[in-house]
Image (cartoon, grey):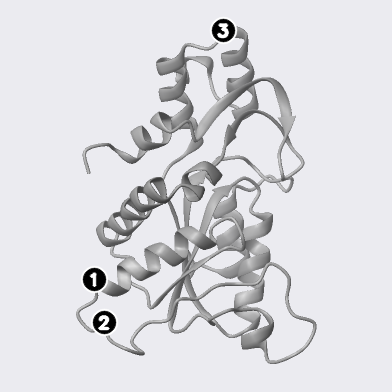
């Protein structure tokens, strides 16, 4: 790969600015967005993205039997990356790996393996989220997996917005408080660093840069 992951994000406008703040899925107002939908809807971009993800996992030695995407935003990315990881395994054969998917809404009845999953995670499992803000969807997913007896070892996110929750904790702080240190946290990119690069590349109005710094609780010189 010739481009860094940050360059991939910037060049494909996965991160960008709002002149007027918009309400995010989390309910918070923000002057910037991180939207991975464009890259997961395009086959070429999804191929590139999953190459970055597989490389990241190899470099960080994040060995797992199952890669599981938080429904539904991270599902496609996790499925394609899981297939690539399986094919790179020396023991890749029929029955050697599972491609797991979660249901956005559980079936009203039946075995948990069918109620919550289309392909239940097996063995050591890493959970993939696309964008983490307060972690609401992520923690709901983790609770469901643990309730089903899945051996969750860690969380990977494509981009961490690095915001504090209403309880004052960051997402990795709350993760450790809620589940302990056995579930690790691995962001592939962080919003403050991405925004600094985006501001320098796109030169938005100074008032918008000030609003971004205030929103993230950063000194202005971090972004300019």
Quarter of the image for residue 1 reads: top left
Viewer-nearest of discs 3 and 2? 2
For this orientation, the residue located farthest to the top is 206
Q: Are marks 3 and 2 in contact (CB under 8 Å)?
A: no
Q: Would you say residue 155 is visible in this rendering? A: no
Numbered tag placed on residue 92 in the rendering: 2
Q: Are marks 3 and 1 in contact (CB under 8 Å)?
A: no
Q: Could you tell me residue 207's position as x and y percent?
A: 62, 9
Q: Would you say residue 175 is visible in this rendering? A: yes
Question: Which of the marked residues, 3 or 1, is nearer the chain's N terminus?
Answer: 1
Residue at left 66%, top 58%? Answer: 137
Q: Is residue 217 left or right of residue 26?
A: left
Q: Residues within 10 Å of mark 2 (few under 14, many from 20)?
A: few
Residue at left 40%, top 17%? Answer: 201
Residue at left 27%, top 36%? Answer: 3
Q: Nearer the viewer, residue 179 or 133?
A: 133
> Which residue corresponds to mark 3?
206
Tell me: residue 61, above or below residue 216. Answer: below
Q: Are marks 2 and 1 in contact (CB under 8 Å)?
A: yes
> Which residue corresponds to mark 1?
88
Tell me: residue 28, above or below residue 73. Answer: above
For this orientation, the residue located farthest to the front is 43
Q: Could you tell me residue 132's position as x and y percent?
A: 58, 48
Q: Quadrant of the C terminus?
A: top left
Q: Is residue 52 left or right of residue 141?
A: left
Element marked by disc 3 = helix
């Amino acid at each position: 790969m010739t481009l860094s992951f940050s360059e991939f994000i910037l060049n494909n406008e996965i991160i960008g600015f709002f002149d007027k703040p918009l309400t995010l899925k989390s309910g918070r107002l923000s002057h910037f967005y991180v939207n991975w939908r464009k890259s997961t809807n395009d086959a070429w971009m999804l191929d590139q993205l999953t190459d970055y993800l597989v490389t990241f996992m190899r470099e960080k030695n994040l060995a797992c039997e199952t890669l599981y995407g938080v429904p539904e935003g991270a599902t496609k990315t996790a499925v394609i990356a899981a297939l690539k990881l399986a094919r790179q395994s020396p023991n890749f054969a029929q029955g050697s790996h599972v491609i797991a998917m979660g249901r956005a809404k559980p079936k009203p009845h039946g075995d948990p393996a069918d109620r919550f999953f289309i392909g239940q995670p097996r063995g050591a499992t890493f959970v993939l989220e696309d964008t983490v803000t307060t972690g609401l969807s992520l923690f709901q997913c983790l609770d469901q997996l643990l309730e089903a007896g899945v051996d969750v070892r860690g969380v990977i996110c494509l981009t961490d917005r690095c915001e504090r929750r209403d309880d004052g904790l960051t997402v990795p702080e709350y993760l450790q408080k809620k589940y302990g240190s056995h579930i690790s946290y691995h962001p592939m990119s962080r919003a403050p660093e991405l925004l600094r690069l985006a501001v320098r590349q796109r030169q938005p109005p100074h008032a918008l840069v000030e609003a971004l710094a205030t929103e993230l609780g950063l000194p202005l010189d971090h972004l300019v």
